[in-house]
């Protein structure tokens, strides 16, 4: 076998490896948008970065991925990451909750991972409710209101992260097509 053919085959395998790596980053990013242990949207963005650096990414017209695409997605990921931390606290505060509800929601979410996805949702809600009642010394009514706020904040933040991660994954697929 000639060295040109061997080199060509090695480049083909490397292109395939890079493509698989980018797709896996997109999939892990989507999962990480829902699971609190994984960084969601940043991992998705790394999939785009891999394509950009390796030069695999071309759109349907055959044009390579522009740096502008990478920068815009980086800004979106940064904004969504900040929003994900602010929104649950904001929703909890506007419904009368304290830091106890926020912490309880996070603890319940982590414990609820065992029973994904229902356990995560119920765990977040129950964690906020019980924490607000026990440590926040609130009655059931205000604790329930705070738990609903914490839960809505969690859903909103998770929803935005998931939408962005799916959009980035779609972008990865477009550039690989």
Image (cartoon, rainbow, N blue to C red):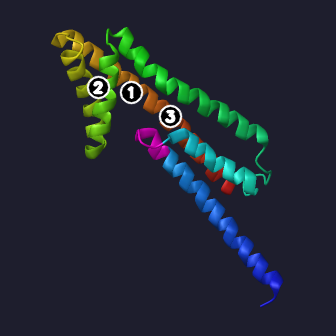
Residue at the front extreme, as displayed = 135
Q: Is residue 6 visible?
A: yes
What is the total number of numbered labels drawn onto the structure image? 3
Q: Is residue 80 above or below residue 44?
A: above
Whether residue 82 is situated above or below residue 133 in the rendered picture: below
Residue at the image position 46 percent from the left and 43 percent from the top: 38
Mark 2 falls on what kind of element?
A: helix
Image coordinates of residue 122 in percent, x first then y, are: 25, 32
Say which of 110 and 51 sits in front.
110
Q: Which residue is mark 1?
A: 154
Among the two numbered marks 1 and 2 on one chain, the one whose residue lies closer to the N terminus: 2
Residue 171: give x, y in percent of width and height.
Answer: 64, 46
Q: Is residue 134 left or right of residue 36?
A: left
Residue 55: x percent and y percent?
76, 56
Q: Assess whether residue 106 is covered by the magenta stretch.
A: no
Image quadrant for the C terminus? bottom right
Q: Farthest residue to the left: give it.
A: 140
Residue corresponding to mark 3: 161
Q: Which span of residues is magenta-colored?
A: 30-38
Q: Which mark is residue 49?
A: none
Q: Are marks 1 and 2 in contact (CB under 8 Å)?
A: no
Could you tell whether 161 is left or right of 171 in the image?
A: left
**Disc 2: which residue:** 104
Residue 33 on the magenta segment: yes
Q: Residue 134 or 24: which is nearer the viewer?
A: 134
């Amino acid at each position: 076998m000639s060295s040109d053919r061997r080199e060509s085959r090695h480049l083909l395998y490397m292109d395939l490896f890079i493509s698989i790596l980018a797709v896996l980053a997109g999939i892990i990013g989507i999962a990480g948008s829902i699971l609190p242990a994984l960084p969601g949207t940043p991992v998705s963005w790394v999939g785009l970065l891999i394509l950009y650096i390796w030069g695999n990414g071309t759109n349907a017209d055959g044009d390579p991925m522009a740096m502008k695409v990478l920068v815009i997605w980086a800004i979106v990921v940064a904004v969504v990451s900040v929003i994900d931390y602010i929104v649950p606290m904001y929703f909890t505060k506007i419904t009368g909750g304290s830091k106890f509800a926020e912490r309880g929601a996070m603890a319940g979410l982590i414990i609820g991972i065992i029973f994904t996805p229902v356990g995560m949702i119920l765990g977040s809600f129950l964690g906020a409710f019980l924490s607000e009642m026990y440590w926040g010394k609130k009655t059931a009514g205000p604790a329930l209101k705070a738990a609903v706020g914490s839960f809505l904040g969690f859903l909103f933040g998770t929803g935005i992260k998931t939408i962005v991660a799916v959009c980035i994954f779609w972008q990865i697929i477009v550039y690989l097509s």
